Image: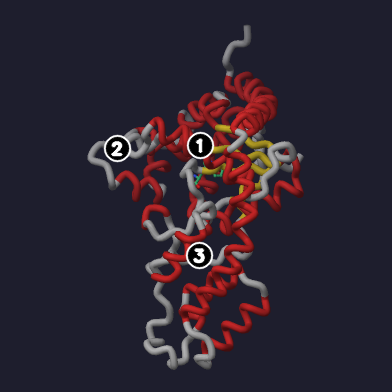
Amino acid sequence: MSRVFSGIQPTGDPHIGNYFGAMRNYVTLGEQYGKNSIYCVVDLHAITNPAASDPAALAQQTLDMAVANFAAGLDPSKVTFFLQSQVPEHQELAWIFTCITPVGELERMTQYKDKSAQFESVPAGLLMYPALMAADILLYKADTVPVGEDQTQHIELTREIARKFNHHFGQTFDEPKAVYNKDALRIPGVDGQGKMSKSKGNTIGILEPLDDIWQKLRAAPTDPARVRRTDPGNPHVCLIFDYHKLFSDLDTIQMVDRECRTAGIGCVDCKKKLLEGMTAHLTPIQQRAEELRADPDYVRDALRQGTKEARAIAGSVMEEVREKVGFLKL
Ligand code: TRP
């Protein structure tokens, strides 16, 4: 049976890079796979950086991430959506995987190299991160994993772990494959300094008030060659045009493309047009998020139900794994 699995970092307020890069993909796959699309807020992964994880903030961000995904169109009654720490089998399988994974393989991961460089004393969990991620995926025998391209190496390691487990203990896991968002154009940050990312502080949140978004857009750089209003611009070097491609309808995209080149439209008007598209897109999501925040019982019940669904699969896979590993059954 074909299954989708993905883990979502509990960063609290997702930005439009997360939305177009990942969240919309979850919704699409959710429509295709139904309950066999399994999404999990990875709070266990979040604490691999103990310095950055403040307990009250973690709990709040975990809840916020569920709200944001439900608001963006994931229906918890149609897909499986839960919290990683509620399903202890993730940790159990992760331990078994750490026992068959060479330290050298883990040290080779670029994400580990980057992140560990920020510590004087590196937490061991940071090194084990990919073993836990492999456990997340293989615990559900998922074959399809929607991720960002930065996760390719981790998926490759998951495949190796699956092979190694099968080799030691007999055929158990198929090798999952990563799927990338087809229109995963790299979404630039609103400062024009490369990719949108939370750590760079250059994001536009999907739940951010539109007034705040407008302040950011107003300050955003455009084609640097377009100094005066009368200078023709090049939309293809302008991040505002990149955003138009995500939020505006085809007519508007073509209009601003043409009018920018001929200086028919100024940058401020072009930004105002963009705000219209963003407003149309984000308002229903923000309204839904408000409704969900006003109904925390609904969100918690949905997560409890998701936990039940996840544990039904995780429990039976772990039973098989325990037996194969040789843990005595009493
Ligand atoms: N490491 C992933 C990220 O940072 C999150 C993640 C954890 C994940 N477990 C996963 C993604 C399993 C896909 C499958 O984005």
Q: Which residue is mark 1?
A: 62
The residue under the point 65% across, 54% down is 284
Q: Secondary structure at mark 1?
A: helix
The residue under the point 27% across, 42% down is 119
Q: Secondary structure at mark 3?
A: loop
Q: Which residue is mark 3?
A: 187
Q: Is residue 310 visible?
A: no
Residue 188, position in %: x, y? 46, 66
Q: CA distance from mark 2 to mark 1?
A: 24 Å
Earlier-in-chain disc, 3 versus 2: 2
Q: Which residue is mark 2?
A: 122
Of marks 2 and 1, the one in the foreground: 1
28 vs 281: above or below: above
* Residue 303 image-quadrant placement: top right
Residue sitting nearer the eye, 265 or 237: 265
Residue 124, position in %: x, y? 35, 33
Residue sitting nearer the eye, 171 or 91: 91
The residue under the point 55% across, 67% down is 185
Other-residue count near label 2 (Cα within 10 Å), few / some / many at <14 / 14–19 / ≥20? some
Q: Amino acid at mark 3?
A: Ile
Q: Amino acid at mark 1?
A: Thr
